[in-house]
Amino acid sequence: MSKVNKSLSDFASLTPLVKRELELHDPSEGHSKFWRIYIYSVAPNYYVARHWGRNGSKGQQMVEGFYSQYTAIESFTTLVDQKEDKGYRPEASPLDKIVREV
């Protein structure tokens, strides 16, 4: 694994092999955050791209490169598990988000 000089825009024309889109919404704690992770394959490498931030912000991103699909999936799974342990859940639908604000 190594951090690479790439951004999500470098993968805009590709369909991710796997993706997870999570959010943490807890008004009592003042949390309204998103966290997204994707695996892309660009032969011969695999890339795990993350995008996170407060809802409504541009957010931050990071891309890591891997030489095997197995290690990319292993990293992806570990990162998703860590976020879910912190209370992140699948992103709500647009309708759910509107209802939440009412």
Image (tube, rainbow, N blue to C red):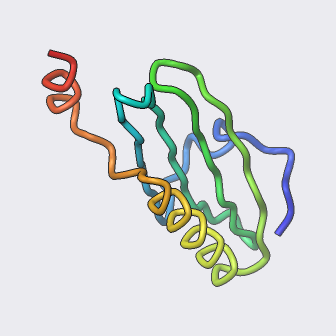
Which quadrant: the C terminus?
top left
At x 35% / y 29%, what residue is drawn?
28
Residue placed furthest toward the front: 28
Residue placed furthest toward the top: 102
Q: Is residue 7 above or below residue 79?
A: above
Quarter location, residue 66: bottom right
At x 72% / y 81%, what residue is drawn?
68
Left or right of 32? Residue 63 is right
Left or right of 12? Residue 87 is left
Q: Nearer the viewer, residue 12 or 34?
A: 34
* Residue 2 placement (x, y as % from top left): 86, 63
Q: Nearer the viewer, residue 65 or 28?
A: 28
* Residue 8 placement (x, y as % from top left): 65, 41
Residue placed furthest toward the bottom: 70
Q: Nearer the viewer, residue 72 or 98?
A: 98
At x 54% / y 53%, what residue is drawn?
37
Which quadrant: the N terminus?
bottom right
* Residue 80 placement (x, y as % from top left): 51, 63
Left or right of 25? Residue 77 is right
* Residue 77 placement (x, y as % from top left): 54, 72
The tally of labels here is: 0
Q: Is residue 4 above or below residue 98?
A: below
Left or right of 2? Residue 58 is left
Quarter location, residue 29: top left
At x 64% / y 52%, what residue is drawn?
49
